[in-house]
Amino acid sequence: MLTLDRPETQFVLSGELSIAYQVFGHGDCDLLYVPGIISHLEIMWEDNDTSAFLTALGQHFRVIIFDKRGQGMSDRIEGATTLEERIDDLRAVMEAVGSESATLFGLSEGGPVCLLFAATYPKKVERLILFGAMAKFWGSDDYPHTPRLEMVLEPLIANWGKGQFAALAGPKGGFEANQLKALSKIERMACSPSGVRKFMLANDLIDVRPILPNVLQDTLVIQRRHDRMVRRGNGRYLADHIPNATYLELPSTSHMPQFEDSAEVLESMVRFVRASRLGRSEDLEQKKLTTALFTDIVGSTEKLIQMGDQGWRKALDNHDAVATALVKQFRGRIVKNTGDGLLAVFDGPVRALQCALALVQALEAIGLPIRAGLHVGEVVNRGEDVTGIAVNIAARVMDKASAGEVLMTRTLRDLTGGSDMSFASKGEYELKGLNEQFELFSPEVSG
């Protein structure tokens, strides 16, 4: 059996949180391993099967692995965590180890994180490998491949750390008593029952189905046929909706790659990486998933008449100063002013939404009520400008908003899981120039 000295656990700041990571192995390709619901960098090496699988990965790749925020050696968090914050953590870890681009290996709920990262930062992702992953974490009428939240949450919490989770995710025939005991320890060390409850509730809004067409990297979807935790329909759905996906179904059971036919899993990963196309497509270089925010001042013509040219010019200067500061605060970029509003873009939907709400409040305070519309989708960068259907949709969504209102598409709402925000449906609308109905939502602001 191959052996490997345990790699040193290191830390990088992502925002104000310390994210724990390890780097080991060798090879001319970086493999960023994105964990599922459980992770603990130190304890996982105590399991022989896990240690052997990681060691084997290190024979072919430089492996980068980390504990997600709220688990393992990384900082604990208050409340839930968003997909957006988790992709921030991926970026921070890659920067810390000097990785300009990598193959992402997403396990289970790490799959949606990888998909959003790949669409948002296409230059950083060479290719994707998804194992036992899903497009939507909890089931619904239009996604029957996973169970509904209410069917799973309370039994899972009641038995957390007792081995039931490990047994469900294990191989056919189960684990021996000693190994089940060790895996139960990993559960307890990774996260408390209340902590895992936060993750499960936050995952209720994970739904990356709308962005799958924007994932243009070569993708290998590995699905075990008898996986009891993430059923085969999930893998099939991903493969059917990601443009450059290859589907591999193995006749085994475990939800975790290090058990059962782990040698076949490793071989398929290595073969896929070697066979994927050389070079980068033009689409990957120019297109990326982006959140577009449009705003405009309500009743601008009437205000111009009331204030006169000089007064209106001063009001617009005040508008621009407030908008510039807030967009920068939420890590966005103003693409252009539209005379009485703006177009700004963001690499995270939650930050864009928070910015829109802050703009409404701040501009109302100086007597400039605005309305705002948001959509997330693929945009094309053309110098400092951006184009694409996502930009047009955001503009049309804004047209439906009233003074002081922020409206967004379902696509954006579905990417805000873990943000502690709630949303009210405003119904379905036909947007000008677009041949489909869009359900629009507004955030319900507490207090």
Image (cartoon, helix red, strand yellow):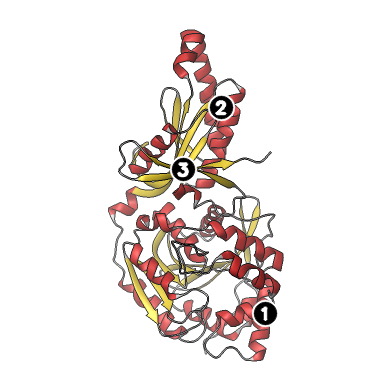
The residue depicted at 52 percent of the width and 10 percent of the height is 311
Query: Pointer 1 and pointer 2: residues touching (CB < 8 Å)?
Result: no
Mark 1 surroundings: few (<14), some (14-19) or many (≥20) residues within 10 A: many
Which mark, residue 427? 3
Q: Nearer the viewer, residue 381 or 152?
A: 152
Residue 70 visible here: no
Report x, y in % for residue 185: 69, 78
SS assignment at label 3: strand
Using the image as rendered, state which of residue 224 and residue 85 is in the foreground. Answer: 224
Marks 1/2: CA distance?
Answer: 52 Å
Residue 322: image tag: 2
* Picture residue at 53% right of the left edge, 75% below the top: 229
Q: Amino acid at mark 1?
A: Ser
Quarter of the image for residue 366 reads: top right
- Secondary structure of residue under mark 2: helix
Q: Nearer the viewer, mark 3 or mark 2?
A: 3
